[in-house]
Image: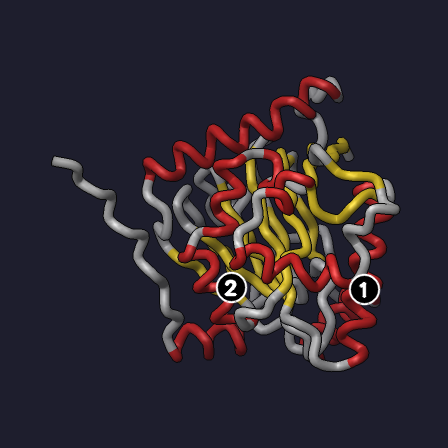
Amino acid sequence: MTVEAAPTPRYVLSKEEHQHFDSMGFLVFRQLFSQREMGEIDAAFMRVISGPAKRLGYDGSSRLAVVPTIEGDDRLLDLFDDCRINDIVDGLLGDDCIYHGSDGNYYVGNTGWHPDGGAPDYRTIKVAFYLDPVGENSGCLSIIPGSHLPKFHAGIKRAIDARTYDRQSPDLPGRYPLVSEPGDVVVFHHGVWHSSWGGKTGRRMFTINYDANPVAPWQETYLKGLMSTISHKTRGDRRIYTERMVNSANEGRMKKLSKLIEWGFQDESLQPMHEPHSWIY
């Protein structure tokens, strides 16, 4: 007798989770992935990052980044089609949202306060997987809740620019540590001010980035500008998606790729991207 594997459970965001994200700018989904799954994901991440680390002569003294990460291995690419991730992302951004890339990292030392870009009144998010246990003073993500909101965001920037707040200190008022274990998934708005403190050398994290489908002309202008910068700086004027991502795409995946393809970021005039890019800094 053949026993079929149980289907992956769907994830429906609650009203409270929607309200929390709207007001605070983040959500944490505890043990969304099993330890067996995390073992597979961990091994896949190491397959992606170990090649560039060896090729670049990485010695662990600085940060190593690989872009895009999930497109470098079939097991990581499975996450893009995983209904749990898609249910959360679609719930926050709409099922017409856009995938714009991923990154994987070996981190070293502290990371000072910063947002990851973002624009007022435009919802863009980062889905983060931490592959090592991280705590308040051992490298977890610390955020300022609500700092994706335009006035609060701008106020923090003014305070940092005026040196009222120290970008390189963990002691910003309102700091909230998002303690994480492998299996947890952390989702946050790109505009949230965040940082990391006291982490061990070589701690590992990768992210998947999404944007709401632009509904206003300025949002389209913003996203096109962002993608042009990413294409030029991190991909050397190559196509925005790897051939692996596009050639193996099902209908659901293609829906999240179609907007950037429509805008020309996968045109034949651009060089193909077969493998992720990597750098040390």
Q: Is residue 89 above or below residue 135?
A: below
Q: Secondary structure at mark 2?
A: helix
Residue 68 in picture, x, y percent from top left: 67, 42
Residue 278, given in percent of the width and then of the height, sits at 73, 33
Q: Residue at x 39, y 79 (%)?
A: 15
Residue at position x 72%, y 30% in the image? 62
Residue at 75% across, 62% down: 262
| Residue type at tag 2 | Val
Task: Tell me if residue 172 can be seen.
Answer: no
Q: Which residue carries the number 2 mark?
A: 89
- Tags 2 and 1 touching, CB below 8 Å: no
Residue highlighted by disc 1: 224
* Pointer 1 local density, CA inside 10 Å: few below 14, some 14–19, many at least 20: some
In the picture, measured across the screen, residue 242 lies left or right of residue 256, that is right
Q: Amino acid at mark 1?
A: Lys
Percent from the top left, x then y, of residue 36? Answer: 33, 36
Work out whether mark 2 precedes mark 1 in sequence or the reverse, and give the earlier one.
Answer: 2
Quadrant of the snapshot with the C terminus:
top right
Mark drawn on residue 19: none
Task: Return the x and y of residue 159 as percentages of the image width and height.
Answer: 76, 69
The answer to which quarter of the image holds residue 4 is top left
Is 27 located above or below residue 130 in the figure? below
Q: Choose between 13 and 143: the one closer to the eye.
A: 13
Q: Is residue 19 visible?
A: yes
Please identify the quarter of the rendering in which residue 201 is found: top right
